Image (cartoon, rainbow, N blue to C red):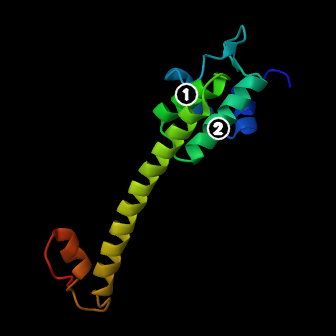
Amino acid sequence: MSALNIGDASKASGVSAKMIRHYESIGLIPAARRTDAGYRLYQDDDIHTLQFIRNARDLGFSIAQIDTLLQLWKDRGRPSADVKALAMGHVRELDDKIRALQAMRDTLENLASHCHGDHRPDCPILAGLEGRAEAG
């Protein structure tokens, strides 16, 4: 593959041009080579790195975690235990988020189950959001 402009790199990697520029601005990826006219150029390795970042973002890793993952990915001598520890830490974070979302869902479902959903103005959902105890 020859050098790609940012639009083609975006299509090839699945990362928007805006995010590619952002990742470059925060140092997550190195600055792209530029043409004499100032256009960014991306090579196969750059596309591969962007795909790696996209996959990590799809799994919910933070930018800081992705930066660490990129460093580990590039270090062929790294122990896999370091990668696993990072991944398992993220699993624990996801578990915490899942519990928090489940609690929100349960609360909202409880409030909604106490709402008649008719012409009356009394609304346990709004009362619950207000902090009043009409939902019980």
Residue furthest top as drawn: 36
**Total tally of numbered discs in the picture:** 2
Residue 18 in sight from this viewpoint: no
Give how far across and how far down residue 96 sits, in percent: 39, 55
Q: Residue at x 64, y 38 (%)?
A: 15
Disc 2 residue type (three-letter): Val
Question: Can you tell which quarter of the image residue 130 is in?
Answer: bottom left
Q: Nearer the viewer, residue 114 or 89?
A: 89
Residue with the mark numbered 1: 23
Pick the quarter of the image with the C terminus.
Answer: bottom left
* Helix, strand or loop status at disc 1: helix
Point out the tag, 2 or 1, that comes first from the N-terminus: 2
Left or right, 104 with respect to 27, comes to: left
Question: Can you tell which quarter of the image residue 28 is in?
Answer: top right
Mark 2–mark 1 contact, CB under 8 Å?
yes
Disc 1 residue type (three-letter): Tyr
Spatial separation of the CA atoms under disc 2 and disc 1 = 10 Å
Q: Residue at x 60, y 18 (%)?
A: 30
Left or right, 36 with respect to 70, comes to: right
Q: Nearer the viewer, residue 69 or 118?
A: 69
Q: Residue at x 43, y 60 (%)?
A: 98
Give how far across and how far down residue 59 sits, in percent: 57, 48
Residue with the mark numbered 2: 15
In the displayed structure, would residue 118 be above or below residue 110? below
The disc at residue 122 is none
Pick the quarter of the image with the N terminus.
Answer: top right
Q: Residues within 10 Å of mark 1 (few under 14, many from 20)?
A: some
Residue 77 in sight from this viewpoint: yes
Give how far across and how far down residue 103 sits, in percent: 33, 68
In the displayed structure, would residue 102 be above or below residue 15? below
